[in-house]
Image (cartoon, rainbow, N blue to C red):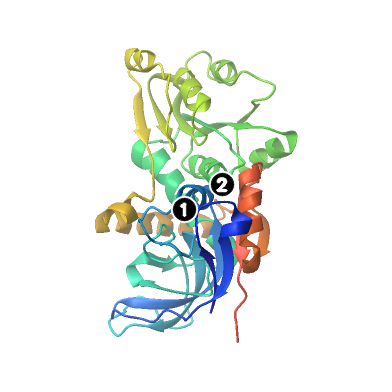
Amino acid sequence: MQAIHMTATGPAAEVLQLVDIPEPGITSPTQIKIRIRAAGINPVDTKLRNKGMLVPDALPAIPGCDGAGTVIETGTAVTRYKPGDNVWFCHGGLGGAPGNYAEITVLEESAAQPMPAALGFAEAAALPLVLITAWEALFDRAGLAAGQTVLIHAGAGGVGHVAIQLAKAVGAQVATTVSTPAKAAVVRQLGADHVIDYHDSDVTAAVMEWTAGRGVDVVLDTVGGDTFRNSLDAARVYGHVVTLLDPGNDVNWKNARNRNLSISFTLMLTPMLQDLPAASRHQGEILDHCAKLISDGKLRPLVSTTLPLAEAAEAHRLVEAGHVQGKLVLDIPAQE
Protein backbone atom coordinates (compact mmCIF):
# COMPACT_ATOMS: atom_id res chain seq x y z
CA MET A 1 0.00 0.00 0.00
CA GLN A 2 1.00 3.63 -0.30
CA ALA A 3 1.49 5.83 2.73
CA ILE A 4 3.25 8.98 3.81
CA HIS A 5 6.27 8.42 6.04
CA MET A 6 7.65 11.13 8.26
CA THR A 7 11.34 10.25 8.27
CA ALA A 8 12.67 13.01 10.54
CA THR A 9 11.72 16.38 11.95
CA GLY A 10 12.03 19.30 9.59
CA PRO A 11 10.53 20.95 6.50
CA ALA A 12 7.58 19.08 5.03
CA ALA A 13 9.08 18.82 1.54
CA GLU A 14 12.14 17.09 2.99
CA VAL A 15 10.72 14.74 5.61
CA LEU A 16 7.30 13.66 4.27
CA GLN A 17 7.80 10.91 1.72
CA LEU A 18 5.34 8.79 -0.28
CA VAL A 19 6.38 5.15 0.19
CA ASP A 20 5.15 1.66 -0.64
CA ILE A 21 4.89 -0.49 2.48
CA PRO A 22 3.12 -3.77 3.38
CA GLU A 23 -0.53 -3.56 4.39
CA PRO A 24 -1.15 -3.91 8.12
CA GLY A 25 -3.04 -7.00 9.19
CA ILE A 26 -5.57 -7.71 11.92
CA THR A 27 -3.80 -8.96 15.04
CA SER A 28 -6.69 -8.90 17.53
CA PRO A 29 -10.22 -10.36 17.28
CA THR A 30 -11.71 -6.93 18.07
CA GLN A 31 -9.91 -5.05 15.31
CA ILE A 32 -11.21 -3.77 12.00
CA LYS A 33 -9.27 -3.16 8.79
CA ILE A 34 -10.22 0.04 6.97
CA ARG A 35 -9.57 1.29 3.47
CA ILE A 36 -8.97 4.97 4.17
CA ARG A 37 -10.68 7.26 1.68
CA ALA A 38 -9.71 10.61 3.19
CA ALA A 39 -7.42 11.96 5.92
CA GLY A 40 -7.88 15.30 7.65
CA ILE A 41 -4.96 17.70 8.09
CA ASN A 42 -4.68 19.38 11.49
CA PRO A 43 -2.21 21.93 12.88
CA VAL A 44 -1.03 19.30 15.36
CA ASP A 45 0.26 17.27 12.39
CA THR A 46 2.56 20.10 11.38
CA LYS A 47 3.70 20.71 14.95
CA LEU A 48 4.64 17.06 15.41
CA ARG A 49 6.51 17.15 12.11
CA ASN A 50 8.51 20.13 13.32
CA LYS A 51 9.07 19.11 16.93
CA GLY A 52 8.94 15.31 16.82
CA MET A 53 6.39 12.60 17.48
CA LEU A 54 5.10 12.20 21.02
CA VAL A 55 6.36 8.61 21.18
CA PRO A 56 10.19 8.61 21.29
CA ASP A 57 12.10 6.76 18.58
CA ALA A 58 8.92 6.32 16.52
CA LEU A 59 10.37 7.31 13.15
CA PRO A 60 9.62 6.64 10.41
CA ALA A 61 5.97 7.19 11.29
CA ILE A 62 2.70 7.67 9.42
CA PRO A 63 1.20 11.04 10.47
CA GLY A 64 -2.42 12.09 10.68
CA CYS A 65 -5.02 11.69 13.44
CA ASP A 66 -8.24 12.08 11.43
CA GLY A 67 -9.61 9.60 8.91
CA ALA A 68 -12.69 8.22 7.19
CA GLY A 69 -13.08 5.11 5.11
CA THR A 70 -14.70 1.74 4.55
CA VAL A 71 -14.33 -1.43 6.62
CA ILE A 72 -12.86 -4.20 4.46
CA GLU A 73 -12.16 -6.89 7.08
CA THR A 74 -13.16 -7.61 10.68
CA GLY A 75 -11.76 -9.64 13.53
CA THR A 76 -13.65 -12.67 14.76
CA ALA A 77 -15.07 -10.86 17.82
CA VAL A 78 -16.15 -7.64 16.08
CA THR A 79 -19.87 -6.96 16.60
CA ARG A 80 -20.38 -3.33 15.51
CA TYR A 81 -19.18 -3.42 11.92
CA LYS A 82 -19.11 -5.55 8.79
CA PRO A 83 -17.23 -5.14 5.51
CA GLY A 84 -18.72 -2.29 3.52
CA ASP A 85 -19.58 -0.10 6.52
CA ASN A 86 -18.26 3.48 6.41
CA VAL A 87 -16.60 4.86 9.54
CA TRP A 88 -14.91 8.04 10.79
CA PHE A 89 -12.32 8.26 13.52
CA CYS A 90 -9.52 10.14 15.25
CA HIS A 91 -6.81 7.61 15.98
CA GLY A 92 -3.04 7.30 15.72
CA GLY A 93 -0.64 9.73 14.13
CA LEU A 94 1.23 10.60 17.33
CA GLY A 95 4.12 8.20 16.81
CA GLY A 96 2.69 5.04 18.38
CA ALA A 97 -0.26 3.68 16.43
CA PRO A 98 0.10 4.51 12.71
CA GLY A 99 -1.74 7.56 11.47
CA ASN A 100 -4.04 8.00 8.52
CA TYR A 101 -1.94 9.40 5.69
CA ALA A 102 -2.21 5.93 4.19
CA GLU A 103 -4.44 3.70 2.08
CA ILE A 104 -5.10 1.12 4.83
CA THR A 105 -5.24 1.16 8.61
CA VAL A 106 -6.17 -1.29 11.36
CA LEU A 107 -7.69 -0.22 14.66
CA GLU A 108 -9.92 -1.43 17.47
CA GLU A 109 -13.60 -1.34 16.54
CA SER A 110 -14.21 0.89 19.58
CA ALA A 111 -11.95 3.57 18.05
CA ALA A 112 -14.27 4.17 15.07
CA GLN A 113 -17.82 5.46 14.80
CA PRO A 114 -20.41 5.01 12.03
CA MET A 115 -19.89 7.75 9.46
CA PRO A 116 -22.85 10.10 8.97
CA ALA A 117 -24.67 9.16 5.79
CA ALA A 118 -25.05 12.83 4.86
CA LEU A 119 -21.28 13.30 4.53
CA GLY A 120 -18.77 12.33 1.90
CA PHE A 121 -15.43 10.88 2.95
CA ALA A 122 -13.56 14.20 2.69
CA GLU A 123 -16.13 15.99 4.84
CA ALA A 124 -16.14 13.21 7.43
CA ALA A 125 -12.34 13.06 7.64
CA ALA A 126 -12.22 16.80 8.24
CA LEU A 127 -14.23 16.65 11.44
CA PRO A 128 -13.34 14.23 14.28
CA LEU A 129 -10.48 16.10 15.97
CA VAL A 130 -12.05 19.55 15.67
CA LEU A 131 -15.52 18.37 16.67
CA ILE A 132 -14.28 16.61 19.79
CA THR A 133 -12.06 19.57 20.66
CA ALA A 134 -14.88 22.11 20.31
CA TRP A 135 -17.40 19.93 22.17
CA GLU A 136 -15.05 19.25 25.09
CA ALA A 137 -14.15 22.94 25.34
CA LEU A 138 -17.66 24.39 25.13
CA PHE A 139 -19.68 21.79 27.00
CA ASP A 140 -17.41 19.50 29.05
CA ARG A 141 -15.20 22.34 30.33
CA ALA A 142 -17.30 25.52 30.19
CA GLY A 143 -20.81 24.08 30.43
CA LEU A 144 -22.15 26.38 27.70
CA ALA A 145 -25.96 26.44 27.71
CA ALA A 146 -28.90 28.07 25.97
CA GLY A 147 -29.11 31.83 26.43
CA GLN A 148 -25.45 32.27 27.29
CA THR A 149 -22.90 34.27 25.31
CA VAL A 150 -19.63 32.93 23.92
CA LEU A 151 -16.64 34.49 22.17
CA ILE A 152 -14.99 32.06 19.75
CA HIS A 153 -11.63 33.19 18.44
CA ALA A 154 -10.72 32.44 14.80
CA GLY A 155 -14.24 31.47 13.85
CA ALA A 156 -13.38 30.53 10.26
CA GLY A 157 -10.68 28.07 11.35
CA GLY A 158 -10.89 24.34 11.86
CA VAL A 159 -12.07 24.32 15.48
CA GLY A 160 -13.76 27.70 15.26
CA HIS A 161 -16.11 26.93 12.40
CA VAL A 162 -17.59 23.89 14.14
CA ALA A 163 -17.60 25.58 17.56
CA ILE A 164 -19.86 28.32 16.16
CA GLN A 165 -22.34 25.72 14.93
CA LEU A 166 -22.27 23.67 18.15
CA ALA A 167 -22.87 26.78 20.23
CA LYS A 168 -25.79 27.86 18.05
CA ALA A 169 -27.24 24.34 18.19
CA VAL A 170 -27.69 24.65 21.97
CA GLY A 171 -29.14 28.16 21.76
CA ALA A 172 -26.13 30.28 22.71
CA GLN A 173 -25.33 33.72 21.30
CA VAL A 174 -22.02 33.73 19.43
CA ALA A 175 -19.42 36.42 18.85
CA THR A 176 -16.37 35.48 16.83
CA THR A 177 -13.17 37.00 15.50
CA VAL A 178 -11.93 36.97 11.91
CA SER A 179 -9.14 38.57 9.89
CA THR A 180 -10.79 39.33 6.53
CA PRO A 181 -14.17 40.32 5.09
CA ALA A 182 -14.32 36.97 3.28
CA LYS A 183 -14.01 35.11 6.57
CA ALA A 184 -16.61 37.41 8.10
CA ALA A 185 -19.05 36.31 5.41
CA VAL A 186 -18.26 32.66 6.13
CA VAL A 187 -18.90 32.87 9.87
CA ARG A 188 -22.13 34.77 9.35
CA GLN A 189 -23.33 31.94 7.13
CA LEU A 190 -22.44 29.54 9.93
CA GLY A 191 -24.68 31.47 12.34
CA ALA A 192 -22.41 33.90 14.19
CA ASP A 193 -24.40 36.70 15.80
CA HIS A 194 -21.58 39.24 16.14
CA VAL A 195 -18.43 39.31 13.99
CA ILE A 196 -15.28 41.20 15.00
CA ASP A 197 -12.44 41.87 12.55
CA TYR A 198 -9.49 41.95 14.90
CA HIS A 199 -7.45 44.01 12.43
CA ASP A 200 -9.94 46.86 12.63
CA SER A 201 -11.35 46.58 16.15
CA ASP A 202 -10.28 46.16 19.76
CA VAL A 203 -11.76 42.75 20.47
CA THR A 204 -12.36 43.28 24.19
CA ALA A 205 -14.00 46.65 23.59
CA ALA A 206 -16.21 45.16 20.89
CA VAL A 207 -17.26 42.32 23.21
CA MET A 208 -18.06 44.75 26.02
CA GLU A 209 -20.18 46.85 23.69
CA TRP A 210 -22.00 43.73 22.46
CA THR A 211 -22.72 42.56 26.02
CA ALA A 212 -23.54 46.01 27.47
CA GLY A 213 -20.35 45.99 29.54
CA ARG A 214 -20.90 42.57 31.12
CA GLY A 215 -18.50 40.37 29.15
CA VAL A 216 -19.26 36.96 27.69
CA ASP A 217 -20.06 33.86 29.71
CA VAL A 218 -17.49 31.76 27.84
CA VAL A 219 -14.38 32.45 25.77
CA LEU A 220 -12.89 29.76 23.53
CA ASP A 221 -9.28 30.63 22.72
CA THR A 222 -7.94 28.72 19.72
CA VAL A 223 -4.93 31.01 19.18
CA GLY A 224 -2.98 31.38 22.44
CA GLY A 225 -0.47 34.05 23.45
CA ASP A 226 -1.85 37.58 23.39
CA THR A 227 -5.26 36.26 22.40
CA PHE A 228 -5.47 34.25 25.63
CA ARG A 229 -4.32 37.19 27.74
CA ASN A 230 -6.89 39.49 26.17
CA SER A 231 -9.58 36.85 26.59
CA LEU A 232 -9.35 37.23 30.36
CA ASP A 233 -10.69 40.78 30.00
CA ALA A 234 -13.48 39.76 27.61
CA ALA A 235 -15.04 37.21 29.98
CA ARG A 236 -17.59 38.27 32.59
CA VAL A 237 -16.95 38.00 36.30
CA TYR A 238 -17.29 34.29 37.20
CA GLY A 239 -16.97 33.49 33.50
CA HIS A 240 -15.10 30.67 31.78
CA VAL A 241 -12.03 30.86 29.54
CA VAL A 242 -11.01 27.68 27.73
CA THR A 243 -7.77 27.54 25.75
CA LEU A 244 -6.35 24.92 23.41
CA LEU A 245 -2.79 26.19 23.74
CA ASP A 246 -0.07 27.20 26.17
CA PRO A 247 -1.02 30.64 27.56
CA GLY A 248 2.64 31.66 27.58
CA ASN A 249 4.27 34.06 30.01
CA ASP A 250 3.17 37.43 31.37
CA VAL A 251 -0.41 36.38 32.09
CA ASN A 252 -2.20 38.62 34.60
CA TRP A 253 -3.39 35.79 36.81
CA LYS A 254 -4.18 38.26 39.62
CA ASN A 255 -6.84 39.89 37.45
CA ALA A 256 -8.25 36.48 36.54
CA ARG A 257 -8.36 35.47 40.22
CA ASN A 258 -9.95 38.73 41.37
CA ARG A 259 -12.68 38.26 38.77
CA ASN A 260 -13.11 34.61 39.76
CA LEU A 261 -12.61 33.26 36.25
CA SER A 262 -12.57 29.54 35.59
CA ILE A 263 -9.58 28.71 33.37
CA SER A 264 -9.57 25.39 31.54
CA PHE A 265 -7.43 23.58 29.00
CA THR A 266 -8.62 21.22 26.30
CA LEU A 267 -6.43 18.65 24.53
CA MET A 268 -8.57 16.01 22.88
CA LEU A 269 -5.51 13.79 22.34
CA THR A 270 -5.19 13.11 26.10
CA PRO A 271 -7.17 9.81 26.02
CA MET A 272 -4.78 8.46 23.38
CA LEU A 273 -1.67 9.79 25.14
CA GLN A 274 -2.72 8.57 28.59
CA ASP A 275 -4.54 5.38 27.52
CA LEU A 276 -7.88 6.35 29.08
CA PRO A 277 -10.57 3.98 27.74
CA ALA A 278 -13.52 5.72 29.42
CA ALA A 279 -12.48 9.09 28.02
CA SER A 280 -12.04 7.53 24.58
CA ARG A 281 -15.55 6.11 24.77
CA HIS A 282 -16.87 9.54 25.69
CA GLN A 283 -15.22 10.98 22.59
CA GLY A 284 -16.97 8.34 20.53
CA GLU A 285 -20.25 9.45 22.08
CA ILE A 286 -19.42 13.04 21.10
CA LEU A 287 -19.06 11.98 17.47
CA ASP A 288 -22.41 10.16 17.68
CA HIS A 289 -24.08 13.31 19.07
CA CYS A 290 -22.54 15.35 16.27
CA ALA A 291 -23.69 12.82 13.68
CA LYS A 292 -27.25 13.51 14.81
CA LEU A 293 -26.69 17.26 14.42
CA ILE A 294 -25.33 16.65 10.93
CA SER A 295 -28.34 14.56 9.95
CA ASP A 296 -30.63 17.30 11.33
CA GLY A 297 -28.88 19.93 9.20
CA LYS A 298 -27.50 21.82 12.21
CA LEU A 299 -23.81 21.10 11.57
CA ARG A 300 -21.76 21.03 8.40
CA PRO A 301 -18.03 20.95 7.73
CA LEU A 302 -16.18 23.55 5.74
CA VAL A 303 -13.58 21.84 3.54
CA SER A 304 -11.62 24.49 1.69
CA THR A 305 -9.16 22.27 -0.17
CA THR A 306 -8.60 18.61 -1.01
CA LEU A 307 -5.26 17.29 -2.24
CA PRO A 308 -4.04 13.82 -3.22
CA LEU A 309 -2.07 11.73 -0.72
CA ALA A 310 1.16 12.35 -2.61
CA GLU A 311 0.83 16.10 -1.90
CA ALA A 312 0.84 15.80 1.89
CA ALA A 313 3.86 18.11 2.06
CA GLU A 314 1.98 20.79 0.15
CA ALA A 315 -0.98 20.34 2.51
CA HIS A 316 1.33 20.98 5.47
CA ARG A 317 2.75 24.06 3.75
CA LEU A 318 -0.73 25.50 3.28
CA VAL A 319 -1.71 24.88 6.89
CA GLU A 320 1.50 26.45 8.18
CA ALA A 321 1.02 29.47 5.93
CA GLY A 322 -2.21 30.17 7.80
CA HIS A 323 -5.49 31.63 6.65
CA VAL A 324 -7.02 28.27 5.67
CA GLN A 325 -10.78 28.50 5.99
CA GLY A 326 -12.21 25.43 7.71
CA LYS A 327 -10.23 22.28 6.97
CA LEU A 328 -7.85 20.80 4.42
CA VAL A 329 -8.14 17.12 3.52
CA LEU A 330 -6.10 14.47 1.70
CA ASP A 331 -8.22 12.53 -0.79
CA ILE A 332 -7.30 8.84 -1.09
CA PRO A 333 -9.17 7.11 -3.94
CA ALA A 334 -10.15 3.47 -3.53
CA GLN A 335 -7.66 1.12 -5.18
CA GLU A 336 -8.76 -1.87 -7.23
Q: Is residue 118 visible?
A: no
Q: Residue at x 25, y 56 (%)?
A: 278
Q: Position of residue 62 (x, y in %)?
A: 48, 65
Name the element at disc 1.
helix
Say left or right for 110 vs 73: left
Residue beneath disc 2: 158
As displayed, is residue 208 above or below residue 65?
above
Amino acid residing under circle 1: Leu
For marks 2 and 1, give the CA distance.
9 Å
Q: How many marks?
A: 2
Q: Looking at the rendering, in which quadrant would you find the C terminus?
A: bottom right
As displayed, is residue 199 above or below residue 131?
above
Residue beneath disc 1: 129
Task: In this rendered view, identify the residue nearer to me: 69 or 25.
Answer: 25
As displayed, is residue 207 above or below residue 269?
above
Q: Position of residue 71 (x, y in %)?
A: 46, 78
Amino acid residing under circle 2: Gly
Say left or right for 21 vs 57: right
Say left or right for 272 vs 104: left
Crowding near pointer 2: few (<14 within 10 Å), some, many (20+)? Answer: many
Of the residues under marks 2 and 1, which one precedes in the sequence? 1
Name the element at disc 2.
helix
Callout 2 touching callout 1 (CB < 8 Å): yes
Q: Position of residue 44 (x, y in %)?
A: 49, 49
Task: In this rendered view, identify the residue nearer to me: 303 or 269.
Answer: 269
Question: In which image quadrant can residue 243 be found?
Answer: top left
Task: In this rendered view, identify the residue nearer to me: 269 or 152.
Answer: 269
Q: Residue at x 68, y 42 (%)?
A: 186
Task: In this rendered view, identify the residue nearer to me: 226 or 149.
Answer: 226
Crowding near pointer 1: few (<14 within 10 Å), some, many (20+)? Answer: many
